């Protein structure tokens, strides 16, 4: 029984190799597949554009103080790995004072 296992594995690999090569030789995509890919790309572009417009509109509606705060935070968190960093000792000891809601 154990001998059959070792013979069976290489035989299965030999059978699978011609199948994968014939698929690779079939070549290009059909017109429908190309159209579908093009349509998906266009949808992605539209979604990205809509998201950017939404962000612009969101910023435009904000008050002056909120815009300043957003700008400060954008500058503070420009680095990709900034979310990983914990605040330093000075930041912990002297946290930023937030304006009161009076």
Image (spheres, rainbow, N blue to C red):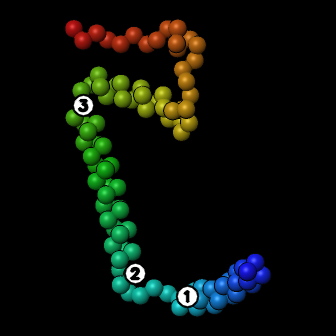
Question: Distance from label 1 to label 2 (Cα)?
Answer: 18 Å
Q: Nearer the viewer, residue 19 or 99?
A: 19
Instruction: Give the mark toward the camera: 2 or 3.
Output: 2
Q: Position of residue 74 (x, y in %)?
A: 43, 32
Left or right: where 72 falls relative to 26: left
Question: Distance from label 2 to label 3 (Cα)?
Answer: 43 Å
Quarter of the rendering occupied by the C terminus: top left
Query: Which residue is drawn at the image coordinates 32% and 65% (left, top)?
Result: 43
Instruction: Mark 3 or mark 1: name the one nearer the start of the chain.
Output: 1
Instruction: Give the mark toward the camera: 1 or 2.
Output: 1
Q: Which mark is residue 34?
A: 2
Instruction: Mark 2 or mark 3: name the one nearer the start of the chain.
Output: 2
**SS at badge 2:** helix
Quarter of the rendering occupied by the N terminus: bottom right
Instruction: Mark 1 or mark 2: name the one nearer the start of the chain.
Output: 1
Q: Position of residue 69 (x, y in %)?
A: 36, 24
Provide the residue designation for mark 1.
23
Q: Which mark is residue 62?
A: 3
**SS at badge 3:** loop
Left or right: where 87 falls relative to 36: right
Q: Quadrant of residue 40?
A: bottom left
Query: Which residue is drawn at the image coordinates 75% and 78% (left, top)?
Result: 2
Q: Which mark is residue 99?
A: none
Instruction: Give the mark toward the camera: 3 or 1.
Output: 1
- Residue 90 sits above or below residue 25 on the image: above
Q: Position of residue 29 (x, y in %)?
A: 45, 85
- Residue 89 sits above or below residue 69 on the image: above
Whether residue 25 is visible, yes or no, is no
Q: Position of residue 25 (x, y in %)?
A: 58, 90
């Amino acid at each position: 029984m154990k001998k059959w296992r070792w013979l069976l594995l290489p035989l299965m690999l030999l059978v699978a190799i011609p199948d994968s090569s014939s698929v690779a030789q079939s070549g290009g995509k059909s017109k429908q597949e190309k159209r579908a890919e093009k349509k998906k790309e266009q949808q992605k572009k539209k979604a990205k554009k809509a998201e950017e417009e939404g962000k612009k509109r969101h910023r435009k509606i904000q008050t002056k103080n909120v815009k300043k705060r957003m700008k400060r935070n954008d500058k503070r968190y420009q680095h990709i790995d900034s979310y990983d960093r914990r605040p330093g000792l000075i930041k912990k000891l002297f946290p930023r004072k937030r304006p009161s809601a009076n």
